[in-house]
Image: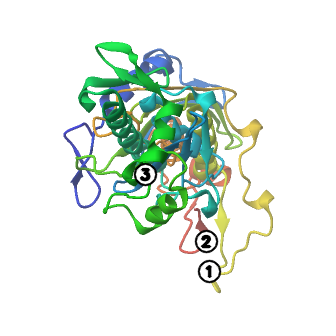
Amino acid sequence: MDSGGFQGGGQGPVTSAFVREALDQGMRTFGWAEKNALAKQNGSKVRGLGVGIGYHGAGGRGYDGLVRIGPDGKLYIHSGVGNLGTYSYAGTCRAAAEALQVPWERCEILRGRTDNHLPHSSGQGGSNTIFTHTRTNWVAAQDAITKLKEIAAQDLGGAPEDYTIGDERVFASAEPARGLTYAQAAARAIELGGKFSGEEYPDDINPITQRAVQGLAGSGLIGVAKDNIPGEGQPPGILVGFCEIELDKDTGKIEILDYTAIADCGTVVHPKNFENAMRGGAVWGVGLAAFERHVYDPQNGLPANTGLYQSKPPTYLDVNVETKMGAVNIPDPQNPTGGRGIGEPTQGAAAAALASAISDALDGHVFNTAPTTTDMIINHLAGNDYSTKYLKTNTF
């Protein structure tokens, strides 16, 4: 898949994709050529190398953004994004701060309660948040910038296009000393009313956002807009994973020696959160590929697992010591901040890479099921039937 490619059963276009670049970067970081040249077997233990690619749709359009500059000069960013532990609501708010050039310590995020007057937002899931809500916060900030320039032109003379912003001020481009601080502009917005203070708002914003603006009216300079940024195609979240294992033919057990993950997710918006997603998704993928077997009684469909020890999630002892990771970091052209999501693909790529490595260690044998557990490996090596049959195994 590349930027001219298509995805899904309907073969729709993507906003951008750089899988070749991710594969090339991953091969170098992983050391594929060097590992591939090493001896494959050492006694009962055999090495295997695998590569996998994970994909998930990673963004939406048409939601609303809402920001407010208070008479104290602070930037208040109203976010309807939930928090599943990823803190995406904070990462996406950075788009508004950067557009308005406000230091992060001068920003306040309002979220989590409807009485905080939150805009219509997407649900947090499916790797959608980064693309969707960096865009909404960006368009809300652009609306605020437009109003800052209009207030400055009205009070200080000239046309709005004669003004620019910086250092929490709006000022004449040709005469930087002539301008207003954000605090002064917000106070003037309250005095002027109308669209500047939220007493009027765009017709195309969602009724939820309309009620939020009504609740904020008269409290500062209001920036509010629907994401109408032009473009088409599905923003893809893509990850390539490279895995090296050692498989013991006597016991069927595997040891993950190395795992490398390279993301094609546009611009990385929140580096620490990105790293956490890459590590957590990799562990989830290892569980899917090799550990978490759910067994059902084929006579009545009831689960036969009675404890986690029978469907064991991977622990620190089951995964690689260190996950090497990186990103192509090529901006998505349909997002002003360049970002796309990278949640679910981290799991899919790790699971596929591990399954591929197991297959490589077994001379290309493919089990065509997940997870591939030690008993299945031993039965295959002994020439026995390892068929899972209907309803006997299943995984999420």
Q: Give me the C-alpha separation between circle 2 and circle 3.
A: 67 Å
Residue 346 at x, y percent in the picture = 52, 42
Other residues around mark 1 within 10 Å, as few (<14) / some (14–19) / many (≥20): some
Amino acid type at circle 2 is Lys
Which residue is more in the foreground, 368 or 351? 351
Tell me which amino acid carries mark 1.
Pro
Viewer-nearest of discs 2 and 3: 3
- In the image, taking residue 33 as reference, residue 40 lies left or right, namely right
Quadrant in which the N terminus appears: top left
Tell me the element at label 1. Answer: loop
| Residue 64 vs residue 89, the one in the foreground | 64
Q: Report x, y in % for residue 139.
A: 36, 43
Q: Quadrant of residue 201?
A: bottom left
In the rendered image, which residue does mark 3 sit on? 193
Q: Is residue 297 above or below residue 84?
A: below
In whole angstroms, how far apart are the C-alphas of marks 1 and 2?
Answer: 6 Å
Specify the amino acid type for callout 3: Gly
Please report the residue visible at 59 percent of the width from the left and 62 percent of the height from the top: 395
Q: Which residue is mark 2?
A: 392
The residue nearer to you, when weighing 201 against 297, is 201
Query: SS class of the residue under badge 3?
Result: loop
Give the color scheme: rainbow, by chain, secondary structure or one colour: rainbow
Marks 1 & 2, CB-CB < 8 Å contact: yes
Mark 2 vs mark 3: which is more N-terminal? 3
* Side of 268 relative to 160 (left or right): right
